[in-house]
Image: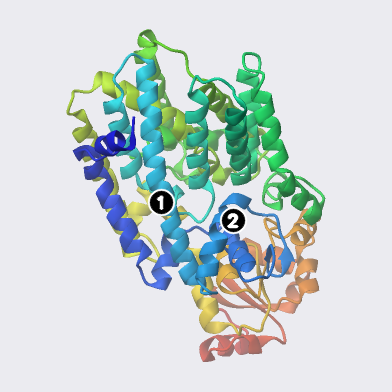
């Protein structure tokens, strides 16, 4: 299919009907006032990567808070560095440009997943054009898909590079030197996008090397390309695993992880409808919906089983094995189970094309309009909430869509209160420090995701000593973060303010760090607020 045919296909009514409201919302958000821009789509952890991009662009090195870091995914940061350079030090303009980059990736993803659906349908004796339209309708109209391309992290980039790799590998072509180089570069870029994508290269070797030994040459080239990143990791903290990964592999809970994986996979089986919270309050209803979503995928595959005219290509088979490896890894070895919806997002590339192909077979010819209408009904209210940029989402949106979990509630009030009340000269620290550190450089990370020194102290349960060592004078963090930060030195600190989700603590004798009259008065009185 040439570009003209692809444009004609994706310019059909159902795709425009589902996608134009999302695109309009993205334009409004990208042009929003600075505070609204920062609190809506980018999430807390996304600001770690954006901080590195800003510091590299400013000539300050690969750092956060003046400390060398490897707690980020390098390809995403590399793409953002020129954007922050163009912004000339303006962190809000850099963020705005990064959001536009996310929109370009979102459009690319819609196109690529449509191509995957078309190819899946053709393997089952179908024309494929209607499957491509159905996949594009779901991808373009789903708020959950839109948000992973604008969260400030590498998730959307990973899906785009991974989809491109699957499409290339599914092609039955001779393994010439040119193809080996192309696949090797794609695999290298994939691992530079997120280090766990090394499992995809392993999966590719497992499914294709026996029939096509030259695949191993492409995998070797990919391994060579990622050597600089591994060397940087060794330089920072003596491990090839980034601190962002090491900080989240300390005490896995396989049972809870398996539950979170189930709900994440169910969410990606039904992206327009199902956005579960990966927090315990949603148990057990979301498990039942997740099972229903996965059962729908199984039924889609069953409905197509007798129509298969060609076996899945090496890319699709590697994708399935890669997804299985991700589920095992994040179930058995990962601590932060609440991130699994993001880490298992590659399931979209396997399940959505299969569902779209089954839709082409089972739905009437104009069924794409009905799907588009359903997507609109389920997602336009959520787009309206995002455009309104609330500091707190309405209760119905928080419960029904998980917006309350994924809106960047650390911007307001953690950062905005700090901006108005804490002197810039004073050193701050927090376990939740991504947003704070991006907009206020004199803030130190305590959870170790981007700070190997803090991680070493955290693992020894001595974060309170690290806080003393760095001379932090103000803490603005969630209550459990405050308790870990002050620890055995509680008497040295005074809680002076209670904000939504956060507590403000000031080191005794440093009350002059609070610059507003109300905040300083509270600190002097020794009270809370």
Name the spot of residue 253 as percent of width and height, x first.
65, 38
Q: Residue furthest front?
A: 177
Q: Is residue 28 left or right of residue 12?
A: right
Q: Name the residue tied to disc 2.
A: 78
Where residue 388 sits, quadrant-wise, is bottom left
Task: Give x and y (percent) for residue 287.
Answer: 45, 33
Residue 236, position as x, y percentages in the image: 78, 56
**Label 1 element class:** helix
Q: Nearer the viewer, residue 226 or 385?
A: 226
The crowd level at tag 2 (other Cα within 10 Å; few <14, some 14-19, many 20+) is: some
Q: Which mark is residue 104?
A: 1
Of the 4 image quadrants, the one containing the N terminus is top left
* Position in image of residue 297 (x %, y %): 40, 24
Q: Which mark is residue 81?
A: none
Query: Residue 318: which quarter of the image?
Result: top right
Residue at the extreme top: 306
Q: Answer whether residue 255 is visible to the viewer in this image.
A: no
Identified at 53% across, 89% down, the residue is 516
In the image, what residue occupies the spot 66% across and 22% down?
214
Residue shown at 79%/59% (left/top)? 457
- Along the viewing direction, whichever of 168 and 268 lies nearer the viewer: 168
Q: Nearer the viewer, residue 198 or 8?
A: 8
Q: Mark 1 Cα within 10 Å, few/some/many (few <14, many 20+)?
A: few
């Amino acid at each position: 299919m040439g570009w003209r045919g692809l444009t004609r296909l994706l310019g059909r009514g159902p795709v425009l009907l589902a996608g134009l409201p999302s695109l309009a919302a993205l334009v409004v958000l990208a042009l929003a006032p600075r505070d609204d821009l920062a609190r809506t789509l980018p999430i807390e952890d996304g600001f770690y990567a954006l901080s590195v991009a800003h510091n590299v662009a400013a000539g300050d090195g690969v750092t956060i808070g003046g400390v060398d870091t490897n707690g980020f995914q390098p390809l995403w940061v590399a793409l953002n560095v020129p954007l922050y350079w163009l912004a000339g030090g303006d962190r809000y303009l850099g963020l705005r440009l990064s959001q536009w980059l996310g929109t370009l990736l979102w459009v690319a993803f819609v196109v690529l997943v449509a191509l995957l659906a078309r190819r899946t349908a053709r393997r089952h004796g179908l024309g494929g054009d209607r499957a491509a339209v159905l996949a594009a309708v779901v991808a373009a109209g789903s708020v959950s898909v839109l948000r992973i391309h604008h969260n400030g992290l590498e998730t959307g980039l990973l899906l785009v590079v991974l989809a491109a790799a699957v499409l290339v590998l599914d092609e039955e072509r001779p393994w010439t030197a040119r193809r080996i180089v192309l696949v090797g570069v794609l695999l290298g870029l994939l691992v530079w996008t997120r280090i766990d994508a090394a499992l995809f290269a392993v999966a590719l070797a497992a499914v294709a090397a026996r029939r096509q030994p030259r695949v191993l040459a492409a995998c070797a080239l990919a391994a060579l390309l990622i050597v600089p990143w591994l060397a940087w990791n060794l330089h920072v903290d003596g491990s090839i695993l980034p601190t962002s990964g090491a900080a989240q592999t300390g005490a896995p809970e396989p049972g809870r992880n398996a539950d979170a994986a189930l709900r994440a996979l169910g969410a990606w089986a039904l992206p327009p409808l199902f956005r579960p919270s990966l927090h315990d309050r949603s148990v057990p209803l979301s498990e039942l919906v997740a099972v229903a979503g996965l059962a729908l995928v199984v039924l889609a595959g069953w409905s197509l089983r007798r129509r298969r005219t060609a076996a899945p290509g090496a890319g699709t088979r590697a994708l399935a094995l890669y997804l299985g490896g991700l589920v095992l890894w994040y179930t058995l070895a990962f601590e932060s189970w609440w991130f699994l919806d993001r880490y298992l997002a590659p399931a979209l590339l396997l399940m959505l094309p299969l569902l779209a192909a089954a839709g082409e077979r089972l739905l009437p010819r104009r069924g794409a309009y009905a799907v588009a209408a359903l997507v609109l009904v389920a997602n336009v209210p959520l787009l309206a909430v995002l455009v309104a940029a609330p500091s707190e989402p309405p209760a119905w949106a928080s419960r029904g869509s998980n917006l309350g979990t994924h809106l960047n509630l650390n911007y307001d009030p953690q950062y905005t209160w700090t901006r108005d009340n804490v002197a810039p000269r004073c050193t701050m620290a927090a376990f939740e420090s991504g947003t704070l550190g991006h907009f206020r450089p004199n803030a130190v990370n305590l959870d170790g995701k981007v700070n190997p020194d803090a991680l070493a102290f955290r693992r020894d349960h001595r974060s309170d000593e690290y806080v003393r060592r760095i001379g932090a004078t103000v803490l603005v963090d969630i209550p459990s973060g405050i308790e870990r930060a002050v620890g055995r030195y509680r008497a040295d600190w005074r809680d002076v303010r209670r904000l939504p989700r956060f507590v403000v603590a000031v080191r005794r004798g440093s009350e002059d760090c609070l610059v507003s009259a109300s905040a300083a008065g509270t600190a002097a009185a020794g009270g809370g607020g």
